[in-house]
Image (cartoon, grey):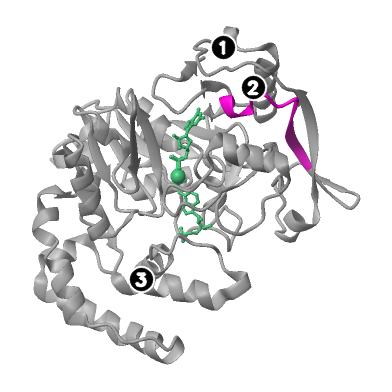
Amino acid sequence: MPAAVAVPCPGMPATVVLGAQWGDEGKGRVTDYFAESSDYVVRYAGGNNAGHTIIVGDQRIALSLIPSGVLYPACTPVIGSGCVIDPKVLIEEMDMLSSRGIEPGRLRISSNAHLIMPYHRKLDSIMERYLGRNQIGTTKRGIGPAYTDKFSRTGIRVQDLFDPAIFRKKVETALDDKNRILTRVYNQLAMSAQAISDEYLAFAPRLLPHVVDSSLLLWEALADGRSVLLEGAQGTMLDVDHGTYPFVTSSNPTSGGAVVGAGIGPGSIGDVVGVAKAYISRVGTGPFPTELTDETGERLIEVGGEYGTVTGRKRRCGWLDLVALRYAVRVNGITKLFVTKLDVLSGFDSIKIAVAYQSGEEMHREFPRQHRVLYESRPVYETFEGWGEDISSIRSFSDLPAQARNYLEFVAAQTGVPIGWVSVGPERRQLISL
Ligand code: GDP
Ligand code: IMO
Ligand code: MG
């Protein structure tokens, strides 16, 4: 008779934290908050296109690849197989943490994660340049080309670093093709397979102690009743399937991507926490129905400090969009909302929330299936009275100004999802648990 199979404890499912907008919702600080009581924090998609800023006291920690759980000594950070890893950036990030007294030794890296190679970075930049006016505004970190190779089955994985002969062969094979494209299509110099292999194989000893079968690690953790947090990067509207394609990233930041990218079954997922800023920002090009290009938008940028963590680019800002947020609730199965940066809205005489898009005679309450509508329509707003007081030291919902409570209650009612937490400042303790 076969031995009984251990089934992960149904009482302790994993929680997903993901962005419900176009990224930069404050996922890093939210993950940091939940990580205090988590045994594992797992990044399940994306790469160093992400920038997650956490403020602890007077320290500002910016992470791009390593999950935010690394700041807690009892928490094991894991980079799942759904991620793409630039090994040089990863090692630099580990060194940065060490130099600040944060020990990254517990980091675990999936052997199945794909590597971002130098030709991916090069192609990302050149392809953007050639797209001219139609460019996506990528982070130029090689994300798109790395995922393209993954799906065309020519990618190179973390585990390949530990088979030098195979690694060299794979790089040569990849470069046969990439060099043709670089030289003949884009008029660039060819890249050297030997130089790339030498550089990457030198990273292998640093990474080896961290590399695991992350799916097995999490299976065992869940079976042991450990708490697992799955941390998303980017946001729902940047999802390659569900976002504003083609102005998206090349992975699935949505909750389905959490299951695939961590290598666990859907039955292991409990809550899906959608992180939504009290307004919206977007970096890069692509439609953004509630964008404000006037002085109100500038004020959100300045007060909210809306400059990219990775590229330093100014983020485009606008009012909260419930059409997009209700869509995010649907495609992710969001069970709780975490509203961030409510403090940034203090001092506005009035605040708006989009409840529909109007295109000619047509009113869209659901996110339109035809992309064109996003450009043609204008948002239909509900206007709310603002509040003047500084709310950054408030720690309970009932102490918030009535206008702020009204704003939040409207969001919960319109999305049908309870708000579990509201943050009122970037520092760890600046939040309200409802
Ligand atoms: P992520 O990519 O979703 O992790 O978000 P980022 O870290 O890129 O951007 C969010 C920014 O907002 C960071 O600089 C945070 O420190 C900051 N932040 C997070 N929560 C709050 C908040 O409640 N109030 C204010 N004022 N800033 C916040
Ligand atoms: P976090 O995790 C905001 C955007 C880029 C570009 C598009 C594609 O910090 O929220 P890519 O380099 O992924 O091919 O770029 O996606 N983008 C982000 N925008 N926050 C991010 O991450 C982003 N990661 C990618 O600006 O529009
Ligand atoms: Mg960010």
What amino acid type should be assigned to the residue bearing mark 3? His
Q: CA distance from mark 1 to mark 3?
A: 47 Å
Q: Nearer the viewer, residue 220 or 361?
A: 361
Identify the residue at image location x=28%, y=44%: 66
Secondary structure type for disc 1: helix
Crowding at label 2, few (<14), some or many (≥20) Cα neighbours within 10 Å? some
Left-right relation of 30 to 100: right
- The dot on residue 120 is 3
Q: Earlier in the sequence, mark 1 or mark 3?
A: 3
Crowding at label 3, few (<14), some or many (≥20) Cα neighbours within 10 Å? many
Tell me if label 1 and label 3 are in contact, CB under 8 Å. no
What amino acid type should be assigned to the residue bearing mark 2? Leu
What amino acid type should be assigned to the residue bearing mark 1? Phe
Q: Which residue is mark 1?
A: 397
Q: Is 169 contained in the magenta span?
A: no
Q: Which residue is mark 2?
A: 408
Identify whether 431 is placed above or below 313: above
Magenta part of the chain = 342-356
Left-right relation of 187 to 223: right
Q: Is 346 contained in the magenta span?
A: yes
Q: Quadrant of residue 413?
A: top right
| Residue 183 image point, x, y percent | 38, 89
Q: Earlier in the sequence, mark 2 or mark 3?
A: 3
Q: CA distance from mark 2 to mark 1?
A: 10 Å
Q: Nearer the viewer, residue 49 or 344?
A: 344
Tell me if label 2 and label 3 are in contact, CB under 8 Å. no
Tell me if label 2 and label 1 are in contact, CB under 8 Å. yes
